[in-house]
Amino acid sequence: MGFMKRFRRQKSPKHKEAARLRDDVYQPAPYTGPDCTRRLDDKILRRIFEEVCPHTADETYDGSEDSGNDGCMSCDMRDLAHCALVKREWYGVAAGLLYKSIRIDAVHYCELEEIFQGERRRKSRGGEDIDAPALRLQQLCRTVRENHYIAARIHFLKIPYMTRESCKADLARTVSVCPNLEFVDLPDGFFNGDPSCHTLRQELQARCPHIRKMKYIEGGEQSLESLMQGYWQELRIVELIKLRIEPGVLRRVFGMLPWLAEVTFSDLPWMNDSVFHSAPGIPDFPALDTITLKKIKNVTVEGLEHCLSNAICRDALTKLTIKDCQGLPVQSLHVILGMATSLLTLEYIATVSTSLPIDPLPPLRSRTLRVLNYEIISNAPNQLYPPGASYYAYLTSSLMSGSLPNLHQLYVRDPDFPESLTLAPPVRPFADSSPQPRGFNQKLEVFSKGLDELEWVFTSVIPADAYGRRGSMSGGRPLSSYSAHKGLGPQWGGDSRKSVVVPNGFGGFLAVPADDGRPRSAGHLSPQHSGGSGNGVRASWMSHGGREKRGSRADLWR
């Protein structure tokens, strides 16, 4: 038998590509000099490890679907785990990052996913695919239940949608040993009072007192009222969607949350101005950093005025979002901006069917506003004079009057709005000494798109100077550039385009057409007009500026 073994040929690996990725590893020459890594303190090591695995630095309260990073997160996590095993001095820093913000992905975002998927099919019984995210959650559950020191490190746990919907028991066992958990992706039934999530809710209320974000949907009224028993007093973000609850009960719940900073009110027919009013025996409306109103019909500008009349609420409010609220038309925005003296961001989204009245309106005036999202959608866009045109004309007049001196970013749902700034009436070049606005006099980043476009088109508008005169030519002429990456539609003539806008010397702007009568495209710009890049194409606001997706040679959770 020993002689016959010589004639047996060696079996080739079943998967040559997987074997090549595992074995074809570059082996650098051994370094024999001094160990320079001993000079790195924990702060520098932490910064290096954050570059190795970027998603470990994600401390946002966004769900798994909304918090994305470039590259393959599973492979990055495996690389960080290897860093923890290199030196004993590195273990504490790397392990602290490895388990602080955990993200379980459904797939590998690299070429290894196809390889591992084939291996899982061969290992599974009956040819069915193995649920890899569910297995990773089970392994994480086993790890944290066996090592409570690791469990205490977890602050953020982000899980794919299908995994948290199908693995409620494993999720409950995991969170039950994580006392410092601040955010976790939960199934939809958790927010509307589904009995299948009762055990998960009990574990989260009893074991995780530091939860910072929670959502309540129709059917979750009892869960919201349970906050008056002292659960989750460190909540910062609360979303209320289609709930049916008394305003007094809601105010008492808010009174139990001293850290509350952001509240979203969405589709609440019972909500009116009385929510903001003071009443004996009921806590006052809390001072919030962010207020979001979506499809709230009965809240008017008088209610917001009553809320902002409180100096504490007025000084705290920095972001206000109003979406499809009939009681808060565009005509009331100047009143809100006049009251909200600390507002930094205003998002106003509305669908209109009629134009603004011809009566003159006071301009939008704010000395603190820095970001304005002004999305007006016309019900009848195919009309000769769409109703949304009057709303954007009102915005243009407000900008040209100099009433928003600190505004730096503007988002509009009108692809022609940046050009409308060039057609706005200029201010007088020789104004008298009486105080009057000198027109648009600050740099403004304009993001615009139409209804059929997916990405924002970036425009940077730079005026001549504060007096409406052209600047000197020594420093180069001021210009404005459009930049887009893709998905702009056929009206842009290609995947990307840049056009140049220069001041006309009288406080307005002048478009510089190309040879064919259209603004210059990115391919026709000189390097100095394209920000110094040789190809003349600049990345858009929606393009990824981080690391490219890269491959890896192992699967940490297999």
Image (cartoon, rainbow, N blue to C red):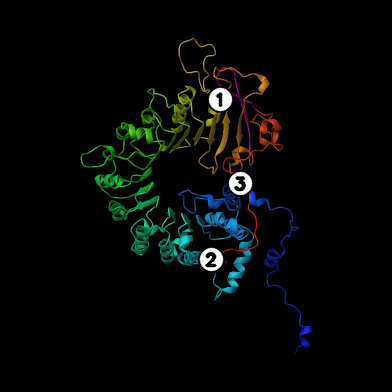
Residue nearest the viewer, comparing 412 with 59: 59
Q: Of callouts 1 and 3, which one flags the residue occurring earlier in the amino acid sequence?
A: 1
Q: Position of residue 482 (x, y in %)?
A: 60, 34
Residue 422: assigned label: 1
Q: Residue furthest bottom?
A: 1
Q: Nearer the viewer, mark 1 or mark 2?
A: 2
* Pointer 1 with pointer 3, Cβ within 8 A: no
Quarter-wise, where is residue 11 in the image? bottom right
Write the residue at 47% across / 61% down. Answer: 149
Q: Which span of residues is magenta-colored?
A: 496-513
SS under mark 3: loop
Q: Nearer the viewer, mark 1 or mark 3?
A: 3
Q: Residue furthest left?
A: 280
The amino acid pointed to by label 3 is Gly
Write the residue at 67% across / 36% down. Answer: 522
Main SS type for the magenta part? loop
- Residue 500 painted magenta: yes
Residue position marked by numbered label 3 in the rendering:
546
Position of residue 507 relative to residue 123, above or below, is above
Q: Position of residue 186 (x, y in %)?
A: 42, 57
Q: Of callouts 2 and 3, which one flags the residue occurring earlier in the amino acid sequence?
A: 2
- Residue 226 painted magenta: no
The amino acid pointed to by label 1 is Thr
Whether residue 242 is visible, yes or no, is yes
Q: Position of residue 349 (x, y in %)?
A: 43, 38
SS under mark 2: helix
Q: Of callouts 1 and 2, which one flags the residue occurring earlier in the amino acid sequence?
A: 2
* Pointer 1 with pointer 2, Cβ within 8 A: no
486 to the left or right of 364: right
Disc 1/disc 3 C-alpha distance (Å): 34 Å
Whether residue 415 is visible, yes or no, is no
